[in-house]
Image (cartoon, rainbow, N blue to C red):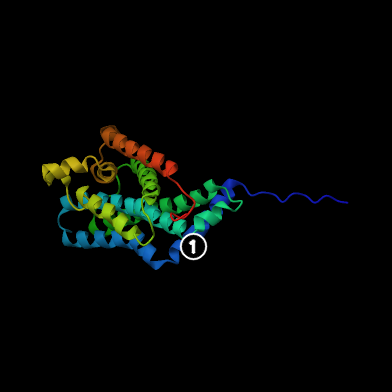
Amino acid sequence: MKVSEPIPQKSSLVLAWRQYRLERKIFWRNPSAAFFNLMLPLLLLLLFGAVFSGNKTYLRVIVPGIAGMGVMASTFSALAFNLTFLREQGVLKRVRGTPMPAASYLGGLLGNAVTNACIQIIVVIFVARFAFGVGWPHNWLELGFFLAVGVTTFGALGVAFSHVIPSFDAAPAYVNAVFLPVIFISGVFYDTKGAPSFLREIAQILPLTHLIDGLSAAMVTGQAMSSQWGSIAVLAVWGLIGGFFAVRGFSWDERGN
């Protein structure tokens, strides 16, 4: 009797790519997610840019600020929401029971978040350039570096924070309780140098402040990366903290189990 040949197994990278393509389709079929992740930062940029269109100094503050906020929204907020939903709906548990490697599934989710962050940055750059006359980024390589560090740091923090959220119904309150204060304290809409001293001290602890500083250096001021080692160090520390708790607290099962 002829022995049947084993069914060939797909590589982890191929499965991750297929999961990524699926996540992109799901994303574009969810108008609310597309609005929050892509359109909201763009609308804020258009609103503030139109009000202060004659103030180039302010535009040089708001452009990297909106870009940094977009990175945080696309990674931290989106992953905290999505992973909580997938966990509480039992999707993660069912995926865990399939032959798909966990790394492939999570890689697809993270790749989707990274893509949205990249789209955010590109849209902000083009709108700032053609709508408000802000120049092209001074250093594209430095911009790419801070984008990579930013999505890594906030992606890890988003996964870690999803472990704190008890249910999907509570996710909006939990995420916004972190997201909204952080974007206001970190200087998304204003220069933190003019803020009260206690707010400046808090802002220097938060990772978004240092991501905005790095993006500002690459996009508008042209400062060398050597002047941003402090910001890189703070982002790295937050990334390590987020990565530690993201792995340590990760659960495939619903919180009720």
* Residue sitting nearer the eye, 20 or 104: 104
Mark yes or no: residue 37 visible.
Answer: yes
Q: Residue furthest front?
A: 257
* Residue with the most extreme right position: 1
Q: Nearer the viewer, residue 225 or 116?
A: 116
Q: Nearer the viewer, residue 149 or 220?
A: 149
Percent x, y of residue 243: 40, 41
Q: Residue at (27%, 37%) from the top-left corner?
A: 231
Location of residue 16 in the rendering, given as x and y in whole percent from the top left corner: 54, 50
Along the viewing direction, whichever of 254 and 180 lies nearer the viewer: 254
Q: Residue at x 15, y 54 (%)?
A: 55
Residue at (44, 42) in percent of width and height = 247
Q: Amino acid at mark 1?
A: Lys
Q: In the rendered image, which residue does mark 1 sit on?
A: 25
User: Please, is residue 146 above or below residue 78 in the view?
Assistant: above
Helix, strand or loop at label 1? It is helix
